[in-house]
Amino acid sequence: MIALKTYQGHLPPCGIFCGGCPVYVRTRKPCPGAQASQRCQQKACRFQVCCTGHGVQHCCQCAEYPCQPFKRFARNWLKYGQDMLANQARLKELGEQAYLEAWNARAGAEPSGEEE
C-alpha cells in the first residue's frame, strides 16, 4: 500500500480516494487530483462518461454496477491498497462527504468538510 495524503477535492465516479493514488502522492509531477484533473473531469475517463450516460454521479448508483469494466479496474487497483468494490459500498453507505472524511482520517487529517 502506498502512503496516503489528504485530499478534499472532487470524488470521481469510480470512487478512487485521490490521496491514495500513486500519481497524486508522487513528488515529481503529481496529479492535481480529480478536482483539477482534465482526465477525470472530461470525456477521457470511461467511468465519467458512463455515469453521465446513466444519469448517476458514482458507479455504485448505476443499475448495471458492478459491470465488467469496473471489475477489471477494481482488480488493478488492489495493488495500490484500494479495494474499489469496497470503496463503492462505503461511498453508497456514507455519502461523498463522510466517505472523504473517513479516508482523510486514515491519512492522518482532521476532517474539515471544506474543499480545497
Image (cartoon, rainbow, N blue to C red):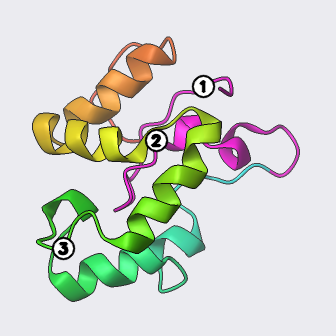
Name the residue at 23% across, 36% down: 90
Which residue in the protein does label 1 denote? 4
Which residue carries the number 2 mark? Answer: 17
Q: Is residue 12 left or right of residue 24?
A: left
Which of 75/8 is in front? 75
Q: Toward the viewer: 31 or 93?
A: 93
Q: Tell me: residue 58, above or below residue 48.
A: above
Please provide the residue range marked out in magenta.
Answer: 1-29
Which percent across, then down, holds residue 86? Answer: 32, 38
Q: Amino acid at mark 3?
A: Glu
Point out the tag, 2 or 1, that comes first from the N-terminus.
Answer: 1
The overriding secondary structure of the stretch rendered in magenta is loop
Task: Determine if the magenta segment contains residue 15.
Answer: yes
Give coordinates of residue 88: x percent, y percent. Answer: 27, 47
For the residues carrying marks 2 and 3, which lies nearer the camera in this image?
3
Q: 10 Å neighbourhood of mark 3: few (<14), some, or many (≥20)?
A: few
Q: Secondary structure at mark 3?
A: loop
> Is residue 112 visible from the viewing direction of this image?
no
